[in-house]
Amino acid sequence: MTASAPPKLSTAVPLNVIVATDCGSTTTKAILIEKIGEEYRQTYRGEAPTTVEAPFEDVTRGVLNAIAEIEELSGRKILDDDKIITPNRASQGDPKTGVDIYISTSSAGGGLQMMVTGVVQSMTGESAQRAALGAGAIVIDVLASNDGRLPHEKIERIRSMRPDMILMSGGTDGGAVTHVVEMAEYVAAAEPRPRFGATYKLPLIFAGNKDARSQVQRILGDKAALEITDNIRPVLEKENLAPARDKIHDLFLEHVMQQAPGYKKLMEMTGAPIMPTPAAVGVIMETIAKRERLNLIGVDIGGATTDVFSVFRGIFNRTVSANLGMSYSISNVLAEAGLSNIMRWVPFTIDEQTIRNRIKNKMIRPTTIPQTLDELQIEQAIAREALRLALIHHKSLASGLKGVQQERTISDMFEQQASGKTLIDMLQLDLIVGSGGILSHAPRRVQSMLMMVDAYEPLGFTALSVDSIFMMPHLGVLSTIDEKAAVDVFVRDCMVYLGTCIAPIGQGKDGESWMDCDIAFSDGSIIESHLKFGDLQVFPLESGATAKITARPAKQADLGAGPGVTITREVRGGVVGLMLDGRGRPVMLPGERTARAAALTKWFNAVNLYPVLDAEG
Amino acid sequence: MAHSYTPGLTVTDRTMVHRRRLLPLAGEVLVNIGDKVRSDQPVARVRLPGKVYPVNLANQLSVAPGEIKEYLVKREGDAIQKDEILAENKPIIKWFKTEIRSPVGGTIESVSSVTGQVLLREPPRVLDLLAYVDGIVAEIILHQGVVVEADCALVQGIFGIGGETWGDIVVAVGSRDEPLLPAHVSPAMKGKVVVGGSFLSTDTMAKAKATGVAGLVVGGIHDKDLRELLGYDLGVAITGTEQVGFTLILTEGFGAIPMAAKTFGLLSAHAGQRASISGATQIRAGVIRPEIVVPYREPASTGAGRDRQQEGVRLGDSVRIIRDPFFGRISEVSALPHDLKKIPTESEVRVLEVRFSDGTRAVVPRSNIEVIEGG
């Protein structure tokens, strides 16, 4: 599977000045990219509230506001009333006027909400889900012949969900058509209606058994804007997701986006097709993984959703946890994680009623920011849980193909692994990339690093990085037009390496010797570290620098080569440095409140996470 | 820096609202442009398709899907009564006869020779779309609905639950910071919109429900009480279909928070008048806030009903602080510094200075205030 990138576009003029926006569900972010010498750099940024709601109900208003902020900061004239001046007028002797192209991504309007259908839930149902997720959609339900729901329940579900689009799959080519046709009959009976626009037909893609096409056409041709494309699972052992995903993109642009307030205008303004934000982030995440040949987990934690991306052994996967986010969905994180799981990351006490009210107040006023340190700590605690839950969700979907018979040897008989086990192997993970407001805008970068370490509990040696100011979506869409520009900005201005986390697997007793390390820096100096179980240490190692580390774990601690086995590795630095995590895996927080607060305070102070904390905060 | 639009809640004594009333499916519009309508008057009507019941005849008759048409007693499009024979076989020995009776009354929507299924659809249900507010039909949207225009007082709440309802406004408390207690709720409040002050407890909600109050408007409630009322923990703020016995509107938020003086004063000034209220809230793109609409019977004098377009926060604006440590306090903007300022979290953000009624001042991030809009 690959991320969903539209074909490369070429532009008539050389691109020297680029303005890009991402219209989020809350905020529209604009960045200016300029060619300085032979290199592209991100120079200015602006933001404004997204305006798909009253009194404006026109997404371009927020776009113009965000660009106007760039104009003020940069001194470059970009707007002529409501028009973006293109191309840049440098050749006319006016180098501070205009841009060469304007591009945009969008998740305003709640993103693309899809319903998918398959025959067998864990096979074609899951393949259809992966195709939709890869195209940047939120999958609001997966219907399958064997999903346990009665036929009339399925019909009611389709009627009530009001998706933006339906993707129907099912059956291998040449296989049985009955169940595929049955599902088409249910969809037809439900007469699905889209969320936006009462008068247009719902886009529906059929990507199932090719032998069922004529039947599906007969049943659904008049009831939906039906498009037929290649089967996403032509044979059991193979997924063919690209044609369906491309079709989702086309229909999203042609039908769904045009229904959202102001999108027709926005589409006229942009010099390249608007991409759904998650698809654009997927493109850039996959680019990083390919460029550096890494196994990677990326996360974009937003206000409404948390998107997780992974590339393992070259296979790209994306999932969206539709109701795990830090503003609109913050209360749902509380509901899913439970208060005790959130409070385990908070180093002070607060009564349940107060924290519940605070979380609900953030839900109803999603654009507010923490003003006090305790509020910041609570939000970062919630973020840890949102990240953790979204990764669990991702692991369950990022799996091999289910239903495929695997060859097994006699030794496999003792290892009961079902087909379709998760592709996410934390020991093989090279890099975690964080993006989204709470990670990109954390006041101290070490806060971003520890949030991800606590949530994901990386094993062995894992590098971490963060999107400096949340510009991955912009670069994702830019990479479809000018890869050099996207890569230049990505390397220089976007990706901030935080450092490397080294964490042995296993459990010990607090204070017992857990891992000894020799850290050899490139200037020849060596630091010896004696890490005790339950300790967290950070050693500075700046961005771009590497160090050779020889780690000797205790006999019950495992860095990936086996318990007690010494490993020597070159590790990468970052703005935080090397984090030696001696808290064991999995991390077991003390159950008793005072002991837990003391442990958290010790860890937080050890890495200089916040302004100095007492045991009670 | 450019002006940016700061979302706020409208609390205004006179404005013109336009409410789009749209059918879920294409239907029939019942009124004309210029018609005066009442909140409970149907303005459009649609026949919603009935529920669908699949019956797998091939399985039940033990025949191939392609053969079921031979066994059908009724055809596609035919009406059928509940328990009427839908299909039957014709064996040589009548003891072996199988009759399949219809589980519902309705019509035969489709017969599939691929799956062997018959889809039965119940009769359509008539749905009347009501005007919701007293006003004038300003626009007809062909086959879909109307726009109703109303000259009214308008209060937007921050969060609500429950659907649209109507009733006369009763102010049950003496001041905006007084909690609404069970003792405040009397039988005379049946069918009324009851305005409380700072807080609403579970006991008061129970009494209001027993009394048959149409709506409750208060400053705040505790989240745990909302959970108790709904029976579940609300994950995202998309509401409006709850059926808890009344419509609830919060004007300030969660916790015990005095209602803004302007809001309480406005609702008090309209006590005894009929209001249309809706608890529907959607805090996502295309935001919907709960509202209390009090239509005027007389037309507005010249110039009335026009709010200034909110373009950004200005000195002297009345604002509500919407985040701790000053959550819920109403104040006035006293300074708008341009430069970014470091706040206690160490974030550098745009801030403003506010002055409280006691003369004290505070610096807060601009994201943490809400303009109280409306003239």
Image: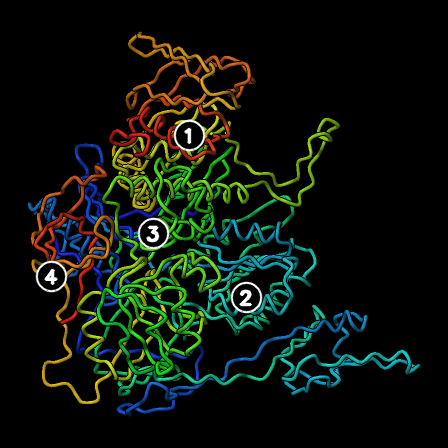
Label 4 is placed on what type of residue? Asp
Q: How many angstroms separate mark 3 from mark 1 (CA)?
A: 31 Å
Q: Are marks 1 and 4 in contact (CB under 8 Å)?
A: no
Front label number (3 vs 1): 1
Q: Which residue is mark 3?
A: A327
Nearest to N terminus: mark 1 or mark 2? 2
Q: Residues within 10 Å of mark 2 (few under 14, many from 20)?
A: some
Q: Are marks 3 and 4 in contact (CB under 8 Å)?
A: no
Q: How many angstroms separate mark 1 from mark 4 (CA)?
A: 47 Å
Mark 1 element type = helix
Q: Are marks 3 and 1 in contact (CB under 8 Å)?
A: no
Q: Are marks 2 and 3 in contact (CB under 8 Å)?
A: no
Q: How many angstroms separate mark 1 from mark 2 (CA)?
A: 48 Å
Q: Which residue is mark 1?
A: A595
Q: Which residue is mark 2?
A: A157
Label 2 is placed on what type of residue? Arg
**Are the numbered discs 2 and 3 placed on the same chain, yes or no?**
yes
Front label number (2 vs 3): 3
Front label number (1 vs 4): 1
Label 1 is placed on what type of residue? Ala
Front label number (3 vs 4): 4
Which numbered dot is residue B358? none
Q: Which residue is mark 4?
A: B317
Q: Residue at x 45, y 40 (%)?
A: A388
Label 3 is placed on what type of residue? Ser
Front label number (2 vs 4): 4
For this rendering, which residue is in front, B236 or A62? B236
Q: How many angstroms separate mark 3 from mark 4 (CA)?
A: 26 Å
- Residue B349, horizontal then vertical, whole percent: 18, 44
